[in-house]
């Protein structure tokens, strides 16, 4: 079966200040990489606009109205020191969510084996009541709830290999035994969460990686902790928060992953998914702020998803 790539035509409608790490050029880098001939077998679709009211599945009642108030009529507004919202940011957030929903349906219906969504803004730092860390809507969390409420998945797993801990996703699901959250991330680093001692209600597995560590430490973390717990959870659907800022070139972190490390991890996650949930995987782009590091990491990730199909 094929792998689906969902692209976002309005990715540049979410504007950030000049020089901000989370900028539209990130998506251009990914799309250029995935236009190479070896990706010709990808099924390609454009993201539709989703109803942002679905954010109420994971965010509190005042969340969307707060974003609407923060959005300027023109130009760029500031939510916190790192997080910005522009006049059309919510339209970009709506197509980012639409990409995930399209991918979720296509995988669930067996039209494709798995999917990758090249979208922005990212989402995994957005908490129940607070947007932060470049993130406006916690898209992967919404997808988990939709998989449960619409597609009948009893158990959904989210694996987050962004270099920064997904505090928002953990915040949303930390007391929910039906959702497993596994994260590898550099420690110490923004946002300062993700202690290995925190396990939620037995549904959270955090592994901190030291600055300067590379693929060997990552493999030990997954083989020794995250993958066994993921397999024991036996999810009906696997979602991935795919950040590529653990790349050795990334300016916002200090891990030393190479493209082959992202490929190895993707292959191992796909193997577990094949045993647990018929290979049903939807991957959402999160971070990655060096153009070349993001491009090569995403290419390695998608190549392994294709191999799993």
Image (spheres, helix red, strand yellow):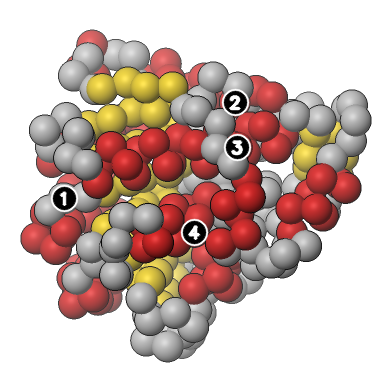
Task: Say whether residue 307 is left or right of residue 296.
Answer: left
Depicted 282 relative to depicted 1: above or below: below
CA gap, disc 2 and disc 4: 20 Å
Q: Position of residue 269 (x, y in %)?
A: 22, 55
Task: Say whether residue 283 is left or right of residue 244.
Answer: left
Q: Image point 36% across, 76% down: which residue?
A: 178
Q: Position of residue 2 (x, y in %)?
A: 16, 30
Reading the chain from its start, which is encountered first: label 2 or label 4? 2
* Label 1 secondary element: loop
Name the residue carrying label 3: 94
Name the residue carrying label 2: 11
User: Observer-nearest residue: 276 or 227?
Assistant: 276
Q: Quadrant of the C terminus?
A: top left
Q: Is residue 254 visible to us here?
A: no
* Label 3 secondary element: helix
CA gap, disc 4 and disc 3: 14 Å
Name the residue carrying label 1: 279
**Residue 67: mark:** none
Reading the chain from its start, which is encountered first: label 1 or label 3? 3
Reading the chain from its start, which is encountered first: label 3 or label 2? 2
- Nearer to us of marks 1 and 3 is 3
- Nearer to us of marks 3 and 2 is 3
**Residue 141: mark:** 4
Task: Say whether residue 136 is left or right of residue 70.
Answer: left
* Label 4 secondary element: helix
């Amino acid at each position: 079966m094929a792998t689906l790539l969902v692209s976002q035509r309005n990715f540049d409608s979410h504007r950030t200040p000049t020089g901000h790490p989370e900028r539209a050029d990130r998506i251009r880098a990914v799309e250029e990489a995935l236009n190479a001939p070896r990706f010709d077998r990808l099924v390609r679709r454009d993201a539709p606009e989703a109803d942002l009211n679905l954010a109420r599945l994971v965010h509190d009642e005042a969340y969307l109205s707060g974003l609407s108030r923060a959005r300027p009529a023109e130009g760029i507004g500031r939510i916190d020191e790192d997080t910005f919202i522009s006049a059309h940011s919510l339209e970009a957030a709506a197509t980012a969510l639409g990409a995930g929903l399209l991918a979720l349906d296509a995988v669930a219906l067996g039209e494709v084996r798995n999917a990758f969504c090249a979208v922005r803004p990212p989402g995994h730092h957005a908490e129940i009541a607070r947007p932060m860390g470049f993130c406006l809507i916690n898209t992967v969390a919404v997808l988990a709830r939709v998989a449960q409420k619409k597609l009948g998945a009893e158990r959904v797993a989210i694996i987050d290999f962004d270099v920064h801990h997904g505090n928002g996703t953990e915040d949303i699901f930390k007391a929910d035994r039906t959702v497993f959250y596994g994260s590898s991330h550099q420690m110490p680093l923004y946002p300062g969460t993700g202690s290995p001692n925190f396990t939620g209600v037995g549904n959270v597995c955090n592994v901190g990686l030291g600055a300067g560590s590379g693929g060997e430490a990552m493999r030990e973390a997954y083989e020794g902790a995250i993958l066994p717990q993921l397999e024991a959870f036996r999810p009906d659907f696997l979602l991935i928060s795919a950040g590529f800022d653990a790349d050795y070139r990334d300016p916002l972190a200090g891990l030393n992953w190479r493209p082959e490390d992202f490929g190895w991890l993707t292959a191992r996650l796909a193997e577990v998914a094949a045993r647990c949930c018929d290979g049903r995987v939807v991957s959402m782009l999160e971070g990655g702020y060096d153009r070349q590091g993001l491009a090569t990491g995403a290419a390695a990730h998608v190549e392994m998803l294709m191999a799993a199909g």
